Amino acid sequence: MGYVETITAAVELAGAVGGGVKYLFEHADDIRKNLDNLVAMLRSAKTLLDTAGDVVSANALKQDPSTEALEVEVVNIAGDEDPGEPKKTKDPGFLRVAMDKAVAFRDDRISDVSRWRDEQALRKKVHDAKRTVLNGASIKMSLTKLVEQLNSDDDAVRLANMGVLDAPGCFAIATYGKFDLGGDPTDYHGIYVGKATCVGDGIAAVIVPSGNADVYADIKYKQNVWVYVFTCVPDMLDDKYDALVNLLEASKSYNARQGQAGE
């Protein structure tokens, strides 16, 4: 039961809590339609040019520097025409290149949008899983509220919390916006996940100055710190701890600091 005094003292000592890409994705369907229309237009222009023989003078093409990089196909329009007559040429090459580039650009954008949608769907699944786990905790309340209940005159409330905190299990200590939880338990600024054969002892070891520095700093500077407790049988302690660290991404947050007490 020593954790009750330790948690209370630690909170009181520290002074605990008081009461261009976006556009692309939003308009993906319109962009894809416009690109499809562009490809269709270029394909039609190429077909028209191939069939109608949009001819120009070969000599004129040779004299125009802008045509040097074009694919030029010389054709004999008149059959057995006088060798002295200028030959005619048609130039579908630039349209073919433009069409190919348009198709490639369209496919790349479609691929980007598809990848982004898959990533968004995955993020939503992870977010929903985090919220379900945190909402399902045996204890889920602000640290100051927990301290109040542990020191409450209401024996039923106090003993109920003690019963949970005396058990083996994992716990998460999360920091939110200063004034309220905001309705979404996954919207934390920082989070620490620990484990202990006695959850109360584990929490007490983390929130003191010698525990996790990030957690203690949040308590000291009166941030909105919440506690989540997940009881389990001792044999499942390590597996549950690993699962919580991974799901809540604690290794990218307060668990990144070494010397994590309570584990």
Image (cartoon, rainbow, N blue to C red):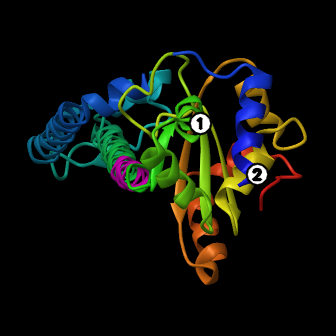
* Closer-to-camera residue (219/117): 219
In magenta, the rendered stretch is 120-132
Which residue matches tag 1? 151
Q: Secondary structure at mark 1?
A: loop
Residue 69 lies, with reference to residue 116, above or below; the image says above
Q: Spot the residue most to the bottom.
A: 235
Dot 1 crowding, Cα within 10 Å, few <14, some 14–19, many 20+:
some
Which residue is painted at 74% across and 36% down in the image?
215
Q: Position of residue 252 (x, y in %)?
A: 69, 47
Q: Is residue 46 left or right of residue 230?
A: left
Question: Counting residues from the N terminus, which is met first, the one under dot 2 or under dot 1?
Answer: 2
Q: Position of residue 231 (x, y in %)?
A: 53, 66
Q: Is residue 124 magenta?
A: yes
Kind of residue indicated by mark 2: Gly
Which residue matches tag 2? 2
Q: Position of residue 102 (x, y in %)?
A: 32, 40
Residue 69 lies, with reference to residue 79, above or below; the image says above
Which residue is painted at 82% across and 52% down in the image?
260
Determine the image quadrant of residue 148: top right
Q: Position of residue 117 (x, y in %)?
A: 32, 48
Quarter of the C terminus within the rendering:
bottom right
Which residue is painted at 80% across and 24% down in the image?
13
Please say whether residue 151 is visible from this viewpoint: yes
User: What label does residue 106 carry, if any?
Assistant: none
Q: Secondary structure at mark 2?
A: helix
Kind of residue indicated by mark 1: Asn
Q: Is residue 108 left or right of residue 12?
A: left
Please say whether residue 57 is visible from this viewpoint: no
* Closer-to-camera residue (59/229): 229
